[in-house]
Image: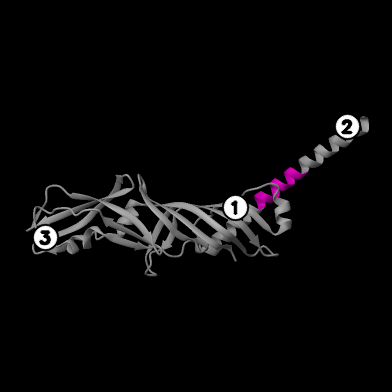
Amino acid sequence: MRALRILLIVVVILGGLFVIADRVAVNFAEGEAADRLKATENLSTTPDVSIKGFPFLTQVVGGSLDDIEVGITNYEAAAGNGAEKIRIDDLRADMRGVEFSGDYSSATATSATGTATIAYDELLKTAKSEPTQVAPGVTANVVGLSDGGNGKIKVTVEATVLGTKLPEPVSVLSSVSVTDGTVRVKADGLPEFGGVEIAESRVRAITDFQQKIDGLPGGIQLDKVQAAPDGVEITVKGSNVRLAG
């Protein structure tokens, strides 16, 4: 019995040491992965990287990791013309089946899903914020975007008719969608500008707009979008997503 007790104590101690070593190793790996991702994507801040699953060391021996969560705040994505940028807030991605090279210089995830937010003030930069003529003597421009409820965006438009600004801005509820990496905002109806008859195409030139978003980390793509209280919530996904290298 005494020998068995001693054996159990040794097993417990060794198990505890293995857990400690495993946690130390995973913390070090998370820091290294964060630094490499920052360099690969030219990020201004170090991202959060969390390696899931236990034990970590046995996953390393196998050459792949089951699950890695990545968090990036204030990611500057390309706006489609190569010059402008659009800020993506709180990008969170779950990377599955991450395989890495023998020297750990590169890592690729089999699949990835995630979420992020584009704030309304950021998306407003895409809309026509400068007064534009929509009919003889009538100019209009978008002055605000906000949550319209039920997955809709409230687009607020200010108009001037014959040199007189309308006393109150007009608004319209709009649907938001994504196609081929482009966020599209389209009015469900048309606002009225002081009773003046205006062609639908001229009105939609103001109320409807779109924003191309390129260059998301690792090659992930926009999948779905929906209006929310703080901005447009986006869902991203991808396959063979490059984390580093």
Task: Residue 90: tell me if it is visible.
Answer: no
Q: Amino acid at mark 2?
A: Arg
- The quadrant where residue 1 appears: top right
* Closer-to-camera residue (157/187): 187
- Determine if the magenta segment contains residue 161: no
Residue position for label 1: 68
Task: Residue 179: tell me if it is visible.
Answer: yes
Q: Disc 2 on helix, strand or loop?
A: helix
Q: Disc 1 on helix, strand or loop?
A: strand
CB atoms at circles 2 and 3 under 8 Å apart? no
Residue position for label 3: 138
* Closer-to-camera residue (28/93): 93
CB atoms at circles 1 and 2 under 8 Å apart? no
In the image, taking residue 164 as reference, residue 176 lies left or right, namely right
Q: Disc 3 on helix, strand or loop?
A: strand
Q: Amino acid at mark 1?
A: Ile
Magenta residue span: 18-28
Residue position for label 2: 5
Residue 102 in picture, x, y percent from top left: 70, 64
